[in-house]
Amino acid sequence: MMDSPRTAVSNPPVQPMESNLTERDLVRRSATAELPPPERQLTPVAKLIDVSKCIGCKACQAACIEWNDTYPPIGENVGSYVNPPDLSENMFTLMLFTEWINPETDNLEWLIRKDGCMHCADPGCLKACPAPGAIVQYSNGIVDFIHENCIGCGYCVKGCPFDIPRISKTDHRAYKCTLCSDRVAVGQGPACAKACPTQAIVFGTKDDMKKHADERIADLKSRGFQNAGLYDPPGVGGTHVMYVLHHNDKPHIYADLPDNPQISPVVQVWKGASKYVGLATMGMVAAGAILHGIFARPNRVQHEDEENAERLVEEATDHREKT
Amino acid sequence: MTNSWTDIKNTDLVIVMGGNAAEAHPCGFKWVTEAKAHRAARLIVVDPRFTRTASVADYYAPIRQGTDIAFLSGVMKYCIDNDKVQWEYMKAFTNASYLVKDGFGFKDGLFTGYDPEKRDYDKSTWDYVIGDDGFVVTDPTLQHPRCVWNLLKEHLAPYTPEMVERICGTPKDKFLKVAEMISECSSPTKTMTSMYALGWTQHSKGSQNIRTMAMLQLILGNIGVRGGGMNALRGHSNIQGLTDLGLMSHLLTGYLAMATEKDVDFATYMSTRQFKPLVPGQTSYWQNYRKFMVSFQKAMWGDNARADNDWAFNYLPKLDVPAYDVLRMFELMYDGKINGYLCQGFNPLLAFPNRNKVTKSLSNLKWLVTMDPLDTETARFWENRGDFNPVDTASIQTEVIQLPTTCFAEEEGSLTNSGRWLQWHWPGGTPPGEAKHDTYIIAQIFLRIRELYRKEGGTFPDPILNLSWDYADANEPTAEELAREINGRALTDLMDPADPTKVLVPAGKQVVNFSQLRDDGSTMCGCWIYSGCFNEQGNNMARRDNNDPDDTGAYLGWSFAWPLNRRTLYNRASADLEGKPWDPSRKLLEWDGTKWTGYDVPDIAPAAKPGEVGPFIMNQEGTARLFARGLMRDGPFPAHMEPFESPVANVFNPKIRGNPVARVFETDLEQLGLSDEFPYAGTSYRLTEHFHYWTKHNHVNSALQPEFFVEISEELAAEKAIANGSWVRVWSKRGSVKAKALVTKRIRPLICDGKPVHVVGIPLHWGFTGSARKGFGPNSLAPFVGDANIETPEYKAFLVNIEPSTAPQEAIA
Amino acid sequence: MAKTKEIQSGDAIHRGPPVTVERYGPYQRVNHWITATCLILLLISGLSLFHPWLFFMTGLFGGGQNTRMLHPWIGVVLFFSFFIFFFQFWRANLPNRTDARWVSQIGDVVGGHEERLPEVGRYNAGQKFIFWGMALFIIVLIGTGLVIWDQYFEGLTSIAVSRVAVLVHSVAAVLIILLFILHVYAGIWTRGTLRAMTRGSVTGGWAWRHHRKWLKELAGRGRIDPAE
């Protein structure tokens, strides 16, 4: 069985291949407690997006549309280069453009960031998902949505620290970048990385990508970007889509990239304490009621109660007849 | 391109000026990223807008459109003043030491010999002092006041940093920073590459824009070296092929000149093309002109082109004007002098300036045939589409015939890229519907016309009846047949000049390259510079060997580059006078004592000794020209000229409007606007999401950039109360468009000659056919004037006004 | 005669024998059972999305997609149904002094020593607690439910708000389920109660035992059908 691909730029093999991403390669499966450990460990992969090399050409978007065979509608210009205006079930990745005046140099910087799923090591979407098997994580790090299991509840949207998943209004299922799991499974890199003309998007093992990032960061520092760095946020256990940022000290300037993303504490409580405390309380109360029902005497109407009632009615009738 | 795309990775400094490589050439731009990532190269962008290229640049400087000559002249002056000149290179490889005739001078923004009536110069004084021996007089010490170098220094004197700021609006500190970065490349071990495109060509002095940078590159010693050069980025994948194959009205193939009315016979034609060397011992390659021309005539008319009929020279059309460029053709249509138009792979309704005039011109035609894979606006010019095409259909009598053609991906053939590589490609899909290859359609038209001439005769049927048409299937010549014809072959056995008993090329075999062409009618060749592309070795354009010994970026085994598979033009200049590379780490060629060796095909005779033959063998001088003699209509040195429509007057002479020798038709002169009525500097450009007017027919591209917009600064938006994303109307003296406003920090007002100049950026890509939202093109606004030398329309600098508006209506009025 | 909040318009005593008392009219009973059905369906569908152990219950609705689609609509039905009910009975559920004593003697309530408790009107404090608790949580649930009803209201609030909403929705759901258990259990444990919502009437003895003040007031006001 083939291991993870090492690059996105090689030409695809022409012979038919078996997928290396199967049920047996899952390390996490949404709403599934007992998952058998995977039989093998695939080498973790990563996509590295070098924001400093990106020219914002949107070839990645075009490749994404073509490969995933989506059909984003033709929108309108709302005074922005961001088109389509948002991620959607038809657009899994999006170039975000920010015009930023660097306060240190007073020079304009046009920050262009390719937005999309970060493939977190600790995926908030998967944590939030109530549908068994709708979100899975493979041993190579890819977090994928399995659409036939998706119920369209939108919990993944709430779980995601990066605002990535979108629910289709047509088929009511959640969509996001798959890191081209269907390509990676047969030895190819993601379509966006393959299409990127400047190789601002590169793909390979996570270790290789970190090494490549080190070279890029050294180059950026030589050009005066002292805070250049790798965005691989520890708050979500690291990601399998990473950025090289010229200003890694302030990721938020890149169209609100979270400075320190983590699964929201609200989501943690919701999917943690509330779930268990809630179930336990409901269980206990129900059990208490049942026990009370079994062991305590039921509150029955007594014969004298009926007599009292009859008496009352008679008295009342008499009284009324007199008046 | 003097160099190749792949060679850009060898550079130390990339200057993108007059172009927007990242945006318009994203795939080629990867080589800039390579140079940045692996050579620590720096990138400078000088542009009126902070472009996508600027977003990845190390340094950005703003400039007012149409003032590049002033900026670059300022850089040249800076380099000379600060001793940042590659002196050895400049002295040996340029005409700096040549003496210029006494009459030549420059005053009040004009060179000697200007005739305002003719809008032309008398160029007789724009030449060298020629000695009694017939060779040019030089002063290698550069002391003589009349040598080119001293005249150049004098010419550049006004272009101080202050003057640059005044004309260009570039803040002095930014200009100086750019000048300093560029000047560092005067070191023999540092090179700069210039990447430019329509940002320089689409001006009334476009040729001079490019020339100024070429001169700067020469004094820095950056021509002919790895990572250097003048690199024109071509807008279409095969537009280089278009000019190479003579699709311009004043050219035959391979830059052979179209004959003019003065060329009464072949001898007269050849008499002005002797190109005798101007320095002793020099190779002047154009002395082979006759071989190429005769071989071309043989390719055209075969046995009907013979020595005794002047090689059928009289079959060639003769120009009665300098050129039938597109502007002139539409002027003639406008005047009703042309009444049929075969429009192949072109969309003039959106591509040519002054759309109203284009519409009127097309309306004057009797017939219009369009050949295109797409339903172009031109084919629908008669259709009323409300605001988007407000024509009166009933009044248009033009008969329009649409012939659907295949697109590039459905065809076999070669595309010539910017780096002169002829890359063969194979069809990737089956043509849809009734689409036919262009070759089929042209063959059908030709065969039918020939039949008509045969049946009915005519004034001069010979060139048609005798045209060589020996294809296996006359109805559809194949790409391979055409390529073989372009390469050329021996018509009789070619004997070796060194050994007359030996057959060099047997009759009927392909010539190996143009060095085997003869002027006695024994060879034929469709395009001499392409010769070698398809010889007896096979189809060299189809080669796909990506080996690159020592990572020089030459890739000699990949496809075929003209001429002779040479990747870097003038590569002899990469070595010094002894033949040693200026930069040993970037060797291209080296003189090994007997011949030139190295990584590229030498651009000089392999045995030409370094000290004896100059590297610029296509020039009679063997040197590159800092002083262009009479070869450019608007001056031997570049001089600052304002656009025809400019927000400020020419600081050297406010009376000069635009380029003083550019051709302007009378009706168009009336349609030029002034800055009091049209205060804003409009400019047009492409966006990376689209390719011209093609990809708006594609859903994916349309989704990525759906709707026409114009870009303005926050300052102008505030002044005019224009909200981001709202509708605006932009109009010029010639037309009006409606667009969404995109308010941006990427365009800032420039202070020029003391007053603010607001730039209005107008991308092209939208029309009224296709998938994207309906819109307009900047050609509705641009003036109908072109470059003085080559007539490229002035699309980059014109005047407009802007106001808030409402959405355009498609409903038929 | 002064108005009383203890008596609903349909309340009446049937002389019998045995004596029965009309407590809920047919519309009120239908109203109650619609509400109850909705609540049960919401409980099942909600719980099935609350914890993976219970996800199998989505099968009752035809799978996860249908469950996700139906749950909010059922919630809307419940909301209107409950509030039709609410506006009929809210006066009778206003707290009074007796309720305080009743609550203070909760041990006697659970122990079944009703004789030690004060006389109770139409509703006792426990019933009132459930009534108001239900009203409160239904409002909370419908409010937060709309925020997370992405099919129609996606994008109207920020994700941060919807995260809080989904948590509050869960907590409120747990609490309303506790109330529901209490309500159901009380109805079963207190024998003779269920028929109030099936047949609409209770026995005179039931009324005497559990809601004597109500019965007395009915009797006192002569809400007794004529003798046969």
Image: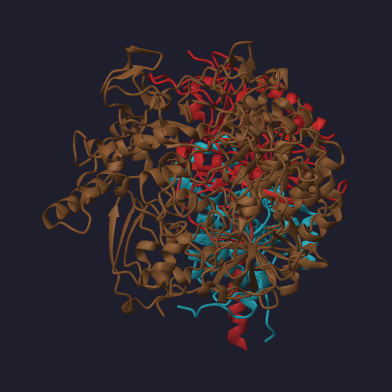
**Residue C72 shows in the view:** yes
Q: Quadrant of the C terminus of chain B?
A: bottom left
Does residue B12 sit above or below B106 in this rendering?
Answer: above
* Lateral position of residue B258 relative to residue B436, left or right: right
Residue B162 location in percent, x, y? 86, 56
Q: Nearer the viewer, residue B278 or B187?
A: B278
Does residue B549 sit above or below C217 in this rendering?
Answer: above
Q: Colour of chain C?
A: cyan
Q: Quadrant of the N terminus of chain B?
A: top right
Q: Colour of chain B?
A: brown
Residue A196 location in percent, x, y? 57, 35
Residue B302 image-quadrant placement: top left
Q: Colour of chain A?
A: red
Q: Nearer the viewer, residue B494 or A73?
A: B494
Residue B657 location in percent, x, y? 66, 68
Farthest residue in the left direction? B455
Does residue B63 sit above or below A124 in this rendering?
Answer: below
Residue shown at the point (82%, 60%) measured from the top left: B166
Farthest residue in the front direction? B132
